[in-house]
Amino acid sequence: MTLATAPLPPFRSAAERLADLVTRTSAGDRDAEAELVAELSRGTLLFIRRLTQDVELAEDLCQETFRIVLMSLREGRLKNPKRLAAFVQGTAKNLLRSEWRKRDRRGLHSDVSGLSLQDESPDPWDRARQAEDRAHVRQILDEMPSERDRQVLYRHYLEDQEKSEICSRLGIAAEQFNLILFRARQRFRHLVESEHHGLRLVHSS
């Protein structure tokens, strides 16, 4: 006698599972909300802790991140469910930047970093913010469809190359550079806004 075996469930990738959770959450499924948070909260918490070096602050920001994410999903703001992970990370980064700005205004860098006021070493908050922003810019640049846009923005903002050098290397007429840069910035900004990256491109100092 042979035993009947139930068919194996079809394999689903992580992206497919998350997309399904987004759909169910948008439909008001609270179990899906709990699954979504369980799936992504640990990685999000580690990401924030790495940048802040502050366990308590990271936990607070992580909770706020998922409060905003779940509210956004209930309201159907995420148009592409497969972008959930990027949406969560973008929300966390926005909260981090808000926290950095508040601490800048209050002059709390030394307190939160654990450094004395006499410590002249680079502030961990500043280092984390600069490194995170550059990594984030590069991530967004990689998503741009135009190779020329990527190269112009990367060379100008991240590499601080001179206008003449960029034009020479990319075969751009000098009189066209400003227009090309302007249009590339516009497309970059559109991508930022459409994907909820929330990052403003500024010239590195």
Image (tube, helix red, strand yellow):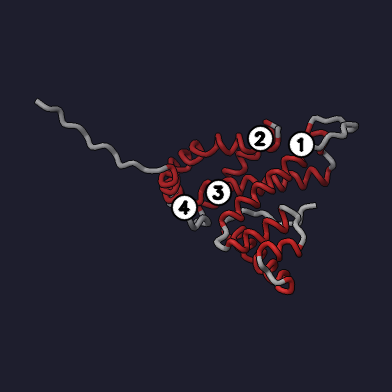
Q: CA distance from mark 4 to mark 3?
A: 10 Å
Quadrant in which residue 198 is drawn: bottom right
Query: Pointer 1: what residue?
Result: 124
Q: CA distance from mark 4 to mark 2?
A: 26 Å
Residue underneath mark 3 = 86
Sequence-wise, the earlier of marks 4 and 2 is 2
Q: Identify the residue position indicated by label 2 in the image.
A: 50
Q: CA distance from mark 1 to mark 2?
A: 11 Å
Quarter assignment of residue 193:
bottom right
Camera-nearest label, 4 or 2 = 2
The alpha-carbon separation of the residues under discs 1 and 4 comes to: 34 Å
Element carrying mark 3: helix
Q: Are marks 1 and 4 in contact (CB under 8 Å)?
A: no
Q: What residue type is disc 1 on? A: Pro
Q: Residue furthest bottom?
A: 175
> Residue at point 87% right, 31% down?
119
Name which residue type carries label 2. Arg
Q: Position of residue 75 (x, y in %)?
A: 51, 55
